[in-house]
Image: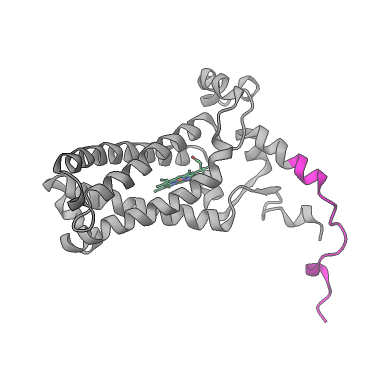
Amino acid sequence: MSRDDQNRNHLGQRMMLRYSASTRVNHWTMALSFILLALSGLAFFHPAFFFLTHTLGGPVWARILHPFIGVAFFLLFALMAVSHVGNNLPIKNDVRWMKQIKDVLANRDERVPPIGKYNPGQKLVFWLLVLCVPTLLITGVLMWRPWFAGYFPVTIVRIASLLHALAAFGAILTIVIHIYAAIWVKGSFGAMIRGFVTHAWAKHHHPLWYDDHVKRERSRPSTDAPTRRDEPIA
Ligand code: HEM
């Protein structure tokens, strides 16, 4: 079986890798912890949301667990941010893509400038999270009782709690947009669940990334010789 045959789905469409298994596990662990943090955080924010403390086993457990999950979430996010930063740097075509947003939404591909692995909207989400997530960690540690808050003047702790709420609001809004965009662009969920996208999807949504992939594939030595999977079973 050739490498090309191995990279086809059950419909015979050619597939390419978008997210490795470790990236996907990291992403979904981060998504789950973010939901738990947002719900328990809202419960602390206003009495109307108090019932949400049950997502972490009641008010006492919610108060204990929220900061620990926050630290774990930050570490997972830092891993993802470091590995994704290269693909989220702005390129020249991003500005033109933004200006042609009507053509993007109407699928008028011929008028849309080619973009790389991420579109400018995804890059904006990335950078907003890079702003909000470390802010959440720093301000969270500043007001973490009984471990750290006692070391800082009360004014600092108060400012920290205000900034924590603002950063949380920003992060929740950003993630709502992120989820909406993921639902809207058919094929994105498949990418983050199974790891693969079709060549047609990549060419349509991220042409420069697709071109890069094709170039890399062409420069790899051919594996048309029989593979272990073709060997007859003795
Ligand atoms: C909770 C529900 C979430 C859903 C349903 C979701 C869905 C997705 C999907 C489908 C992709 C693939 C997009 C593509 O490759 O075109 C993706 C990528 C990504 N996700 Fe999420 N995600 C969620 C939460 C989060 C959270 C909490 C974070 C970080 C704080 C995050 C950060 C990212 C990043 C950095 C990428 C790669 C770049 C991008 O598409 O923006 N996601 N997500």
Q: Residue at x 38, y 41 (%)?
A: 175
Camera-nearest residue between 68 and 114: 68
Camera-nearest residue between 212 and 128: 128
Residue numbers of the magenta segment: 214-234
Camera-nearest residue between 139 and 168: 139
Q: Residue at x 71, y 53 (%)?
A: 8
In the image, residue 120 sits, relative to residue 46, either above or below, namely above
Camera-nearest residue between 1 and 155: 155
Q: Which residue is drawn at 57% across and 58% down?
A: 21
Residue positioned most to the bottom: 234
- Is residue 217 shown in magenta? yes
Residue 217 shown left or right of residue 29 in the figure: right
In the image, residue 74 sits, relative to residue 177, either above or below, namely below
Residue 202, given in percent of the width and then of the height, sits at: 64, 39
Residue 49, given in percent of the width and then of the height, sits at: 16, 48
In the image, residue 98 sits, relative to residue 165, either above or below, namely above
Residue 156 shown left or right of residue 86 in the figure: left
Q: In which quarter of the image is residue 86?
A: top right
Residue 184, given in percent of the width and then of the height, sits at: 47, 37
In the image, residue 192 sits, relative to residue 165, either above or below, namely below
Residue 182 shown left or right of residue 214 in the figure: left
Residue 190, given in percent of the width and then of the height, sits at: 54, 49
Residue 148 shown left or right of residue 22 in the figure: left
Q: Is residue 173 visible?
A: yes
Please state, as top left, top right, bottom left or bottom right, where the C terminus lies in the image.
bottom right
Please state, as top left, top right, bottom left or bottom right, where the N terminus lies in the image.
bottom right
What sort of colour scheme is used for the picture?
Answer: one colour
